[in-house]
Image: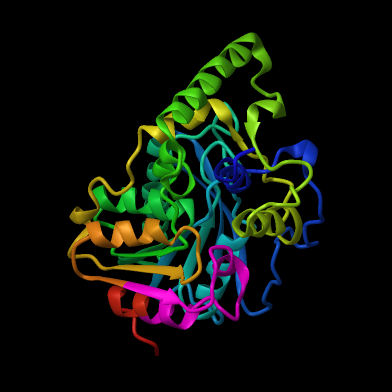
Amino acid sequence: MKAWLLMLALLVGVVPAFAKGTAMNNDKTFPVRDDVVCRSVRYPNRFDIQLAGDLYLPPGFDANKKYAAVIVGHPYGGVKEQCAGLYAQELAARGFVALAFDLSFAGESGGTPRQTVSPEVYAEDFSASVDFLGLQPFVDRAKIGVVGICGSGGFSLSAAAVDPRLRAMVTVSMYDMGRATYKGGDDKLTEAQRRAQQETWANLRWEEAACNAADPALRFGTPEVLPKDAPLPVREFYAYYRERAWHPNYKGQKLTSMPALMNWDPFLHIADISPRPILFVVGANAHSKYFSDDAYARAKEPKRMLVVPNATHVDLYDNREKIPFGEIEDFLRTALGFPKE
C-alpha cells in the first residue's frame, strides 16, 4: 500500500477485527481527574440525530454562576473517550465548562448507516453542540468557543464560518480531510491514482447495495500488521489508535463515504470567521503542518499560528509535555472575555 494511502487509513479508523488493546476501566483512554466532574449528555442535531457527549465541569462548579464553554471535537474517525476528552478535562480543570462529543454515525452518537462520513452533518454537529451548551443555565451564550483536533479542526472551522455563535476557534494538528482524500498525503496523489481510487470506491457501492454494508471489509482502517518500512506518521497513528488510545467504540469509516470528502473544502469561507479570532496550533515536525499553513494564509485577522517545537502531529493528541494547554487557555480566556478569578 502506498505510504500516503496507508497514512490516511490509519487516520480514519480501526477495523474491529483488527482492534487490540484495553480501554481504561473508566472508559477513557487517559487518566481522569478527581476534581473534574464528567457527566454523560445527549442532545439532537438539526437532522434529529442524537449526539452523545461528555460534559466536563470545573472544580468547585457552581450551577448559579455563568461559565465560558468550549466544545472539543475529536480527530477524524476518533471518539470522545480519546484525546478530545483529555482536552475537555484539562480545560474544565482550568475553569471552563467543556464538552467532548462523538460525531454523528459513530461512537455513542446516533445516525445510520453507521460509520458514515458526511462533512455537512459533521459541521452541523458543532452547531448542535452550541445549541446544547447555550441552553444550559450555567453557560454564557456569548462565551462559547471550540477546539478542533485533527479532522475536527476542519469541520469546526466549516461550522464557524456560518455560525457566529462560535466566538473563538482553536485548531490542533488540523487535517483538511477533503484535500487529503482528493490529493493524498503531501498532495502526491496523481490524477490516474485518484481516478482509480474513485473507481474502487464506486464499485464498493455494489457491495453495500447487496446488503453487505455492515461488513468490516468495507471500512477504511488500519492494517492488521504494521509494515516494517512504515514512515513515521504511519507509526505514530498506529501507536496511538491501535495501542495506547485504543477504544472499543472506534470502528473505522465507510469507504463509500470517501467521495463526500473529495467534494468538500473546509476553508472555502474561512475568511468569514473574522473578526472572531483563530488560533492554529501545530507541531513543528508534523507531517500535516501544511494544512494549518494553508488555512492560516486564507484566514483573515485576528489569527495566530502557534508552532510547537519538536512536536509531531500525534504528539499534540496526548503528550502533555508538549501540548500547550497554557497558551490555549490564555487565548480562549482573552477571546471569550473570561478572565481568571
Residue 327 counted in the magenta span: yes
Q: Residue at x 69, y 54 (%)?
A: 238
Compare residues 218 and 135 and report the one nearer the observer.
218
Q: Residue at x 43, y 62 (%)?
A: 289
Q: Residue at x 66, y 39 (%)?
A: 221
Residue 26 counted in the magenta span: no
Q: Position of residue 229 (x, y in %)?
A: 71, 52
Answer with the quarter of the image where residue 189 lies. Answer: top left
Q: Is residue 278 visible?
A: yes
Side of 32 where 201 appears, left or right: left
Magenta residues, start to end: 305-330
Above or below: residue 131 compared with residue 34: above
Above or below: residue 336 compared with residue 148: below
Answer with the quarter of the image where residue 338 lies. Answer: bottom left
Side of 155 where 102 appears, left or right: right
Side of 159 where 107 appears, left or right: right
Q: Quadrant of the C terminus?
A: bottom left
